[in-house]
Image (tube, helix red, strand yellow):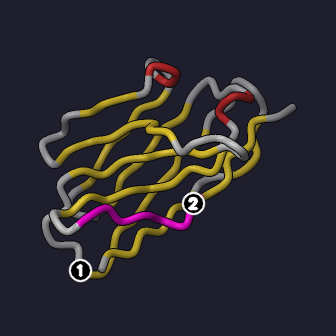
Amino acid sequence: QVQLVESGGGLVQPGGSLRLSCAASGNIFNIYTMGWYRQAPGKQRELVATITNGGNTNYADSVKGRFTISRDNAKNTVYLQMNSLQPEDTAVYYCAADQAIGRNWGQGIQVTVSS
């Protein structure tokens, strides 16, 4: 029902920054919460940050103070500003958009932090 396209990933050195974007299209009615999750090889997918229609945010403890999630409801787009990146942040990052019918996932985008 909803298509999510992530952009902005890539390779960055430790201490660097990246800004991820996720644009929603299709049947985008009543998207309540959007967010970012990440998954490293052999690991479980974990929450990074979420944001509601009202702007309430939630962050994983590991990224608090370094990452900022924001949302442009008019553009149906969610962003993740990632600062002070560390090798432990290396993962595939997935965008998610929640509707009453269920959760929609993007294809994922690679973020690699390495010198």
14 or 106, which lies in front?
A: 106
Q: Residue at x 59, y 55 (%)?
A: 8
108 up-or-down from 39: above or below: below
Quadrant containing the C terminus is top right
> Left or right: where does residue 84 sit relative to residue 59?
right
16 up-or-down from 11: above or below: above
Q: Which residue is mark 1?
A: 27
Q: Amino acid at mark 2?
A: Gly
Q: Are marks 2 and 1 in contact (CB under 8 Å)?
A: no
The boundaries of the magenta stretch are 102-108
Residue 107 in magenta stretch: yes
Q: Which residue is mark 2?
A: 108
Q: Position of residue 78 (x, y in %)?
A: 36, 53
Q: Position of residue 102 (x, y in %)?
A: 26, 64
Q: Secondary structure at mark 2?
A: loop
Q: Position of residue 107 (x, y in %)?
A: 55, 67
Q: Amino acid at mark 1?
A: Asn
